[in-house]
Amino acid sequence: MKSRVQSLKSRVEELRRRRNAVILAHNYQPQDIQGIADFVGDSLDLSRKASKTSADVIVFCGVRFMAEVAAVLCSEKTVLLPDLNAGCPLADTITKEKLCLKKKLHPEAIVVCYVNSPVEVKAESDICCTSANAVKIVNSLKNPEILFVPDENLGNFAASKTGKNLILWHGSCPPHVELRAEDILELKAKHPEAVVIVHPECREEVIRAADEVLSTGGMVKYSREIDAKEIIVGTERGLLGRLRKENPDKIFHLASELSPCAQERGEKLFCPDMKVITLEKIIESLSEMKYKIDVPEDVREKARRSIERMLK
Ligand code: CIZ
């Protein structure tokens, strides 16, 4: 007899075929969702893969801004987000209106917008970036004034790597800023052979304590290629499942997991928004074709320009 999970997976399979759909899962999604996905990766990588498939429907298992990027890059496809509660507190720190006010204060500045932002903000920006290419994008700009939104830590990291003085927005990712340098130092003392990789959305002090600063895609590649047995990972815990599965010969420690001081504060590198999508919700989404992510044509055109400028 089929288990409940197997039945749910069969139902997903049936609907995926009936709708000619592709299922995308972000690196931070739970393992059962990653397990049924056609592609697993970071937001941009996923949208680019989706645009190359012949699917009619994209089910985006991630958060809203990611589904919006897919809708911008794949305008001829229907993009579904299985739960509209999948938001992003970092993206919520900025709106088009707030950005326009800031632009008035810095009329000469070029605006670089991190992918973790609402689509209207991308449309109001000059160029987009991801955590993987922020340093490269900032470095490529000749403008004397650069306004970087909305992640302050990623902006600081890009500024330190390029030597440029950026005007920063005061936004941050709650799970990443929970991590402290003392957590890393404590874990390093416990596992002296381990290398430490952290996400650039972490605090400056955490970045200083790490061996490498990488996007989730960068962490996947680094973990595969590095000749090290133990790796301490400073990013949202969903990525650990993928890293362990792909590298069974290596040991991965979540940067906050073993640290007593982190545990005392209840910090877990956990993004609740990344965990709201379930197999049941994917079934509902494909059955009822909900929730469609529609981006108005004028916004889509402008956002596409800033994403394509980054891709160039
Ligand atoms: O671009 C992404 O998907 C995010 C939000 C992070 C990363 O490093 O992949």
Image: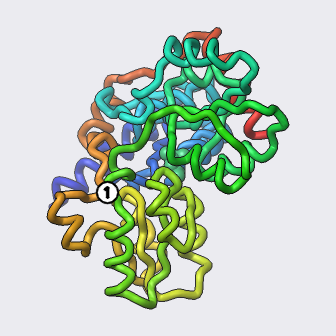
Q: Say which quadrant the C terminus sits in.
A: top right
Residue 208's place in the image compared with 108, above or below, is below
Is 80 left, or right, of 84 in this rendering?
A: right
Label 1: how many residues lie within 10 Å, few (<14), some (14-19) or many (20+)? many
**The one of 6 and 258 positioned closer to us in this rendering:** 258
Q: Quadrant of residue 281?
A: top left
Q: In which quarter of the image is residue 15?
A: top left
For the point 59% across and 52% down, the residue is 157
Residue 285: x, y in percent? Answer: 33, 30
Is 101 left, or right, of 159 in this rendering?
A: left
Residue pushed farthest right? 142
Residue 147: x, y in percent? Answer: 65, 30
- Where does label 1 land, which residue? 269
Residue 291: x, y in percent? Answer: 37, 23
Q: Say which quadrant the N terminus sits in.
A: bottom left
Question: Label 1 is placed on what type of residue?
Answer: Leu
Q: In which quarter of the image is residue 109?
A: top right
Is 31 left, or right, of 229 in this rendering?
A: left
**The one of 238 and 281 positioned closer to us in this rendering:** 238
Residue 304: x, y in percent? Answer: 68, 25
For the point 41% across and 89% down, the residue is 192
Residue 153's place in the image compared with 308, above or below, is below
Secondary-structure class at tag 1: loop
